[in-house]
Image: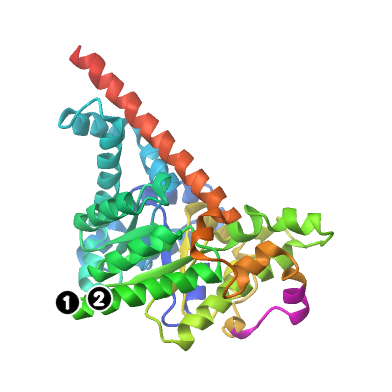
């Protein structure tokens, strides 16, 4: 049996988890597209690998799958809708016929909850079979309200009501961490998203600890509770202010140095949590493959540099496809990579950049600054734009309903 690249990564630590970073609803369509374009000599091998990672029938029947969980966000939920627009247009019209058809935002939220509900149902048996350890689907509160505590808490509670295997994604803003504490106090599993920096990760761990203390004091059942903290790795180095601030100070940064800086932030947070035996688990996302093409070298430092660690890796379809196309040119994973640090000289160089100091130093930012951090602001704006597109898709479908009624 030939192992998938991600199965090889998981083998570097028995507690490592590989998650699917998209709705389970699109997996079969994506799998078919990958196999259609697979090299002839690899098609059967790839089909077996992708079936081991996720097969809806096996998950529903036996409660097993290679993926240990699923993450979604507004752009990924939009992909699920776009993958079957006719079905979802009809579904939106059905939902719209039972609600106030003039309230598009209300219908949108009901549709989003439906996307999460369907995904959670597909892998619910995995959750039940594992005793609540695996089989979660993350559902995210509306990214247009990243500093609205009341709105986020209301939506978080609604998401949690869908099914016990729904994990609520909350942004890494000051208000977001207040919501994480509240949800944790209710025994609700959370995923801290739009998070990039050590100060955010510490704030999340502190919020979780306070919430757990409150939950235990009131006798809340925590036997099926989990917490993950997302490091949006390549977004830290590439969509924020790192490059601009480096250029303004005459500091030249290579892609490798940026990558090592991103991983230094993650490793610092990971060790902080491990030293304190904190129950939250670090989740690595937003990975990239560096590929020189046929005959050239390939690598993915976002996973290779932390191999051997006890991480969750959530992998979107495109990233998995890139790994598979480059699999024969990727170096073997070093299970001791997690213990290797960037050089002191590089860290000293990076610390000359205010943006990196904010991300790396334990006191680099105050909580009220989290939502203004460059990578946070850029990512939240991107997610909000995807949400608006989904709302407009809903509006168009509702308009069709109005015309039919008329």
Q: Quadrant of the C terminus?
A: top left
- Mark 1 burial class by Cα count in 10 Å: few <14, some 14-19, many 20+: few
Note whether residue 190 is visible. Answer: yes
The stretch of residues the image draws in magenta is 339-348
Rendered image: mark on residue 218: 1
Q: Residue at x 73, y 53 (%)?
A: 244
Q: In the picture shown, does residue 258 fall above or below 205?
A: above
Residue 347 on the magenta span: yes
Task: Kindly check if marks 1 and 2 are in contact, taking CB atoms under 8 A apart as contact.
Answer: yes
Label 2 neighbour load within 10 Å: few <14, some 14-19, many 20+ = some
Question: What residue lies at 34% left-to-right and 24% top-to-bottom?
Answer: 396
- Residue 7's spot in the image, x, y percent? 47, 72
What secondary structure is the magenta-colored segment mainly?
helix
Which residue lies under the disc numbered 2? Answer: 214
Expressed as whole percent of the image width and height from the top left, the position of residue 174 reads: 44, 61
Secondary element under disc 2, as helix, strand or loop, is helix
């Amino acid at each position: 049996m030939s192992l998938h690249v991600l199965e090889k990564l998981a083998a570097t630590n028995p507690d490592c988890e590989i998650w699917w970073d998209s709705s389970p609803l699109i997996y079969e369509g994506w799998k078919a597209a990958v196999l259609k374009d697979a090299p002839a000599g690899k098609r059967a091998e790839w089909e077996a690998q992708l079936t081991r990672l996720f097969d809806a029938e096996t998950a529903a029947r036996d409660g097993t799958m290679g993926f240990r969980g699923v993450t979604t966000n507004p752009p990924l939920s939009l992909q699920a809708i776009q993958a079957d627009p006719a079905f979802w247009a009809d579904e939106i019209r059905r939902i719209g016929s039972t609600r106030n058809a003039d309230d598009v935002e209300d219908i949108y939220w009901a549709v989003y909850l439906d996307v999460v509900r369907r995904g959670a149902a597909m892998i619910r048996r995995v959750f039940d079979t594992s005793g609540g350890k695996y089989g979660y689907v993350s559902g995210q509160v509306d990214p247009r309200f990243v500093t609205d505590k009341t709105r986020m808490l209301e939506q978080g509670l609604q998401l949690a009501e869908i099914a016990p295997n729904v994990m609520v994604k909350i942004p890494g803003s000051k208000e977001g961490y207040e919501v994480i504490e509240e949800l944790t106090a209710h025994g609700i599993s959370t995923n801290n998203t739009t998070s990039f920096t050590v100060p955010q990760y510490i704030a999340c761990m502190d919020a979780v600890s306070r919430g757990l203390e409150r939950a235990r004091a009131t006798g809340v059942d925590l036997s099926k509770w989990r917490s993950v903290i997302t490091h949006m790795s390549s977004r830290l180095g590439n969509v924020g202010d790192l490059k601009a601030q480096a250029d303004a100070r005459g500091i030249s940064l290579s892609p490798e140095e940026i990558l090592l800086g991103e991983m230094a932030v993650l490793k610092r947070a990971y060790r902080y949590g491990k030293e304190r035996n904190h129950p939250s688990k670090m989740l690595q996302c937003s990975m990239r493959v560096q590929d020189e093409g046929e005959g050239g070298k390939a690598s993915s430092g976002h996973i290779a540099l932390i191999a051997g660690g006890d991480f969750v890796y959530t992998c979107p379809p495109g990233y998995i496809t890139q790994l598979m196309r480059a699999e024969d040119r990727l170096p073997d994973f070093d299970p001791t990579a997690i213990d290797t640090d960037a050089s002191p000289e590089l860290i000293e160089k990076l610390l000359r950049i205010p943006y990196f100091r904010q991300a790396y130093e334990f006191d680099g930012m105050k909580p009220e600054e989290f939502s203004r951090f460059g990578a946070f602001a850029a990512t939240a704006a991107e997610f909000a734009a995807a949400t608006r597109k989904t709302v407009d898709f809903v509006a168009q479908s509702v308009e069709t309903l109005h015309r039919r009624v008329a």
